[in-house]
Every structure is written in structure tokens, then in C-alpha cells.
Image: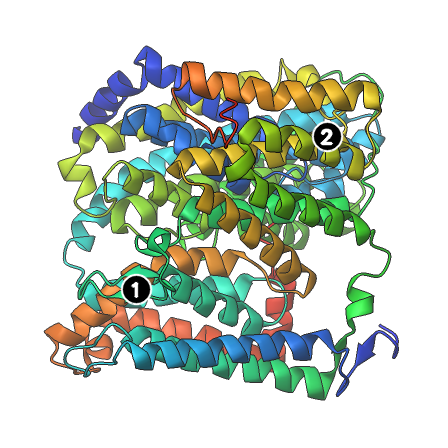
Amino acid sequence: MTDQTNVKLRLNNSELWGGLIGLALGAFVIWSGLKLKLGTINDPGSGYVLFYTGILMCGFAVSVMIAAVTEGGPTFASRWQNARWGKPVLVIACLTAFAFALEPAGFLLSAIPLMLLLLRVIDPVRWSLAIPLSILAPLGMWWVLKHLLAIQLPSGMFEIG
Amino acid sequence: MDTLVNVAHGLGVALLPVNLLYCFIGVFIGTLVGVLPGIGPISAMSLLLPVTLSGTPESGIIMMAGIYYGSMYGGSTTSILVNIPGEAASVVTCIDGHQMAKQGRAGPALGISAFGSFIAGTFSLVALMLVAPSLASVAIAFGPAEYFSLMVLGLVVLTFLTQGSMAKALLMACIGVVLGLVGLDSITAQPRLTFGRIELIDGIGLVPVVMGLFGVAEVLLNTEQAIKRDIIKTKITQLLPSKEDWKASAGPVGRGTVLGFFLGILPGGGAVVASFASYALEKRLSKHPERFGHGAIEGVAGPESANNSAAGGAFIPLMTLGIPPNVVMALLLGAFVIHGLQPGPLMISQNPTLFWGIVASMYIGNLMLLVLNLPMIGMWVQLLRLPYNVLFPLIILFTIIGVYCSSNNVFDVHVMIAFGVIGYFMRKLGYEPAPLVLAFVLGPMLENNLRKSLILSQGDLMTFVERPISAICLAFALVLLIGPLLPSLRKKRELVALDEGA
């Protein structure tokens, strides 16, 4: 790795941020453990294991951070170097929109646009294949589940499906 | 004699038409996911976990087991023909397998891989039959302290073998334990980390977590790169290895089988470790190590036998102790739990139909796989031409439906998408998901056994070191934890550390 991709005490050191997130999570777990009550060593309470796991998390996170500062770590930019980062971002956006639409719109009305978007977003499939596939795949799955396995997928406010 | 009676009894179960069908579906899907890069046995098993609900426990487990050992067969096809491992355990097969294919010897490479897999799979089943009942009778004497220490050892071994920093892997394991503890405390019935959400009272589901971390995250990672495939175009002929090929492969197959079986039993080990270890062993033993990497058949025969043998061996800790040694077995444990069954020392005596039925089905499954992977190789080669831009959206659709069907709950779909995104960023930042998932499954058992041991010993921590099995496990775990601090051991760890999530 070159100097530009491996940094030590810098804000764009991805290892440092990874450790910081771990430390914050560990602190939260310790706090949750304390809130749930530790109990005694003879009779451990609900928070006993959480508390000590939180301490271990903080320890490992600090170890990651120390390594990040002393040995350096890759920058965020280098982690996504030569990667088509826009593609996963688009897929995540599609999935988030789907997650919000699933209950109100129902499975069919949310899955068909999701499929169409994914087929066109990842590595564009020609329209003549993308349209029938995006309709037939969710419709086929819905039919099999509803009629053969008696599983009802969400039908949404329009009660389609 | 008892064993033979039990096998006959098991064959009676495995040969029921419905179980034969489930076995075939399992090995077929296993080969399919093994052949297709991007989806491994973990994603496929998590996808099909809800399907096991529709049949008897035997049928469901037979199918799930079939996916696992089936994927070991299928993975080699892609490695040899495309130079892309179909699943993580076939990474090593790419090295010499693809070179053989380039030299026009794809047929013998595929042939020895299938025959080696069959021999190893059969051996591991015989060993499973002989070892499991004896180990189960010993395991009855295990108390909570032994179980706790064994689980700690399993987690530490997995973190030791995980690629990258050990601190990161241990951090992931801790997060897994915490996630596993979400929901009602099994002893006090107090809700923990539920944030007032009623959906979290029963805890976070295994299916959405695994599908998110392995299914969705894998698709997200794959969309970053335009995957190029270099499929061998020449017709595949002469699948049966020649006399010389057999002569060269006999030793590697035998050694790989034995090595793989023992590495499969170890907690945290498994097919991936076994294949790498076998390749290293064969290269070291070879009189002409320079041939490795240039199409040596030993480099295909050894690892392929080892990974199949390890797949069989991995059933031992699950069946006899109830402890899954790796993520795949953790999913299988999930399938048992869905059916209200608890694998462990009592399962073989209390539920012999299930145990021997599964073992017998694996013999039949291995035979099915030999047929699927040799005469029908052409079908799998055609499948390799399926474009990824069509495959990935379909995988996402299947994961969504699979998660929804497992609980009939939209919340789980949200959880899966969230874990998919988290899994993607984790992998980008060098945090492997395998320790998290194993710890997620073991977390509640770990906590239960720790608390029980402390209550039983009246808070005396010496209980963990006074009991020999517990002390040995903890000592071994400690060595592995301290080991990476020593430069020589650190180097060795980097050599064997693997990307289990692939």
C-alpha cells in the first residue's frame, strides 16, 4: 500500500473509525448491562453477561484503534478504489424504498418495481427481458406461495395479491 | 452389530420416497449453489430454512445436510472450469484444477474431484457412525462448565482462523453474543435490548441475520465488480481418470480424507480449513512440489477429498454435543430447533430414527451426487453461462420471500435488509461475518451455561479449571488468544486464515 492509501492518525483512517464504532457499541452494551442489573456472582442477573461482553468489546475495539494509530490503516477512499461504489449504493436505495413500500403497497406492487430497478441498475439487462422477468418472477413466486404453500404475502392497502 | 442394525433402520427411513425426494432436492440445490459463484451453502441453507417447516424433521434436516455436502461437490466444477471458486472450500481447487482444464484435462480434473469427494464422503460417514454414538455416551457426563468452555473454544478457534485482525474477529464474536441475547432472558423473563419493539421479544431471527449478512451483503459486494468469466470452451471428455491419474491421486485422496475428517470435527474448523491444509500437506510431501500451481492432479484430489470429509466430520460436534462447529452447522442447529428438537448427547438414544435416518440419507446423497456431477456435468457447464445481472436480482427476491415466509413478518424483511447493508460495510472494512453468526447462535447457550455453572458452583470460578475437559478447552483457547502476539505464530495464522464468508 502506498502512503496515500495507508494513514495513521488521520480522520480518513477507516480502521480508526471501525474501532471507534466498536468502542461506542461496547459502551452502550456495558450501560445496558448495568441497567438490567448484574446480580451477584452466585446468582448472575440479566445484565451480567451483557456487561462483561461490553467490557470485552471495548477492549477489542481499543486494540483495533491502537493498531490503526501505530501501524496505520487504509483510507476510506482506498477501500472503494477501483470499485463501482455507485452500484451497491443504488441497490441499497432500492432495497430501502422496497422495505418502506412493502407493507402499504403489498408484495406485488413493491416487488415488481424492485426487480425492474435491480435488473436495470446492476448491469443493465435489455428492456425486452427486464420487463417480463420483473413481472413474471414475483408473480410466479406469489402464485406458488399462495396457491401451493398457502402462504399469504402482504397484499397492502389495495389488497392486490 | 448394533451399528449395522441401526444403519439398516436408518436406510428404512432414508429410502422413504418423500425423504429420497428431499435428499435429491438438497443435493441438487447444493450442487447448484456450489456451481454458481456468489451464493454459497450458507445463503442457500438460510434461504431454505423456512421450507423445512413444511415436512417432517427428518425430511427437512436431510435436505439441509444435502445442500451442505452437495455444495462441496459443485464448488469444484466452477473452480476447474471458470477459475472462480463456487464456494469458499473450493478456492484451492482453482490453482491446479483450472490449469489442468487449460491443458485440456478438465475431464480428469472433474472426475478425480468427484471420485475423491465420493470416497471421502463415504469414509466420513462410516467414521461418523462409529465415533458419534461413543462420543455421545461420554458427552452425557458434560456439565454446564464443560459446555461453556467448549463453546468458548469454538468461538476462539473460528476467530483465530478468520482472515484479518484477530481483535476484529473477536469484536465481531462479542457483537454476535450481544445480538443473540436480544429478547426475553430465559431465566428471569426480563426483556433485553428490545427498545420497546414487540417483534424483538422473541429475539432477532437467525434467518434474517444470516440472509442479510451472507445473501444480501454478498450481492452488494458482487455488484461492485463486473465479474468476468473465462469458461473453458472445449468439450469435456474422458471424465474417468487414467491409471496414472489414480496412482498419483490415491495418496492425496487418502490423506485428505483423514485430515479433513479430523479438521471437520474441531470447533471452528471445517471444509475451508481442511482444503487449504490438504493442499499444503500434498505440496510438502510431493517429490516435485514445483508441479503444484501448474496442473498437478494431487492439488485437486487432496483438497476436494478433504473438504468433503470435513463436511461429514462437522456433524459430529453438532449431533453429539449439540454445539455447531461452524456457521453451516449453526444453521442446521436452527433447523433442528425449528422442529422443537435439541441435538446433543441424548438425541442418538432418544431419537435414533432421526440420527440414523440422516446418516443413511448421506450415503444415498453421495451416490446421487456422483451421478449429478459426472454424467450430468454438461448441464452445470450450461448453467455457468447464466448472466449475473439476471441472477443477482433473483437472489434478492428469493431472500426477501424466504425471510418473510420464515416468520410471516415484514419486520424480519427490514432486519434482513439492515443486516445486508451492515454486512456490506463490515466486509468493506475488513470485519468478517462468520464469527458474528456463530456467536449469535451460541450466545444464548453460552450465557445459560455460564450462569448455570456459577449458580451450581456458588460463584466459584475455579469450577472452570477444576474440571479437566473444561480446563483443557480453556487452556487451548488461551493459547490461541495469546498466540498471535508471537511473531512466528502470527505468521502461521496469516497463512491459514481464511475468508469463511465467501
Position of A158 relative to B284 (above/below): above
User: Dot 2 surroundings within 10 Å: few (below 14), some, or many (20 or more)?
Assistant: many
| Viewer-side residue, A19 vs A124 | A124
Res B262 visible: yes
At x 43%, y 33%, the residue is: B405
Vertical placement of B362 versus B432: above or below?
above
Residue B155 place in picture, x, y as percent:
42, 64
Write down the residue under mark 1: B446
Q: Amino acid at mark 1?
A: Leu
Q: Using the image, determine if residue B347 lies above or below residue B122.
A: below
Q: Name the subunit of mark 2.
A: A
**Going by the image, does B19 lie left or right of A21?**
left
Residue at the image position 68 percent from the left and 37 percent from the top: B37
Q: Nearer the viewer, mark 2 or mark 1?
A: 2
Q: Badge 1 local density, few (<14 within 10 Å), some, or many (20+)?
A: many
Q: SS class of the residue under badge 1? A: helix
Question: Residue sitting at 30 percent across and 39 percent down?
Answer: B338
Near-viewer residue (B68 or B410): B410
Mark 2 vs mark 1, CA separation in Å:
44 Å
Residue sitting farthest toward the top = B17
Numbered label attached to residue B265: none
